[in-house]
Amino acid sequence: MVMMNEEDIEASDFNSGDLVDIINTTGGVERVASKFIIVKYPIPRKCVATYFPEANVLVPITSVAEGSNTPASKLVVVRFRKHQG
């Protein structure tokens, strides 16, 4: 499940209930989390939320917090494409 703002869904080519792949291309490497269902959720516009560890694949291994060296999974730029399955 990927939670999106209702207005963002309406402004996109997607609908609530669509099956999508979530993509991150940081550093020129395509990372894909497949088969997520879009769900309307009262989240701020231009933000999305999903669950981890299912979406861990989207976080570049080199993207870590200073000091703690933990994965920086709270800020991952993503885009979507319809799942082809």
Image (spheres, grey):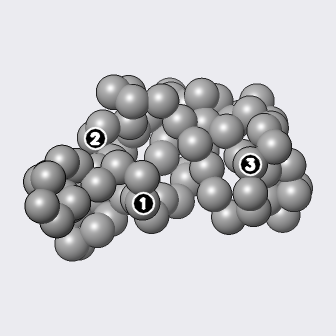
Q: Between disc 1 and disc 3, whose residue precedes?
A: 3
**Residue, disc 2:** 57
How far apart are the two marked residues, 1 and 3, measured between alpha carbons?
A: 15 Å
Q: Closest to the observer: 5 or 23?
A: 5
Q: Residues within 10 Å of mark 3 (few under 14, many from 20)?
A: some
Q: Kindly identify which residue carries mark 3.
A: 43
In the image as oriented, which residue stretches furthest toward the bottom? 27
At 80% from the left and 38% from the top, the residue drawn is 40
Q: Would you say residue 6 is visible in this rendering? A: yes
Measuring from the top left, give residue 1's x and y in whole percent: 60, 28
Residue at image point 55% right, 53% down = 80
Residue drawn 21% across the image and 72% down it: 27
Give the amino acid at mark 3.
Ile
Q: Judging from the image, what secondary structure is the residue with disc 1 in?
A: loop
- Report which residue position mark 1 lands on: 75
Query: Which three-letter amino acid code belongs to the residue tagged 2?
Result: Val
Residue 16 point in image, percent of width and height: 80, 36
Q: Position of residue 20 (x, y in %)?
A: 58, 39
Q: Is residue 69 left or right of residue 55?
A: left
- Residue 50, position in %: x, y? 53, 36
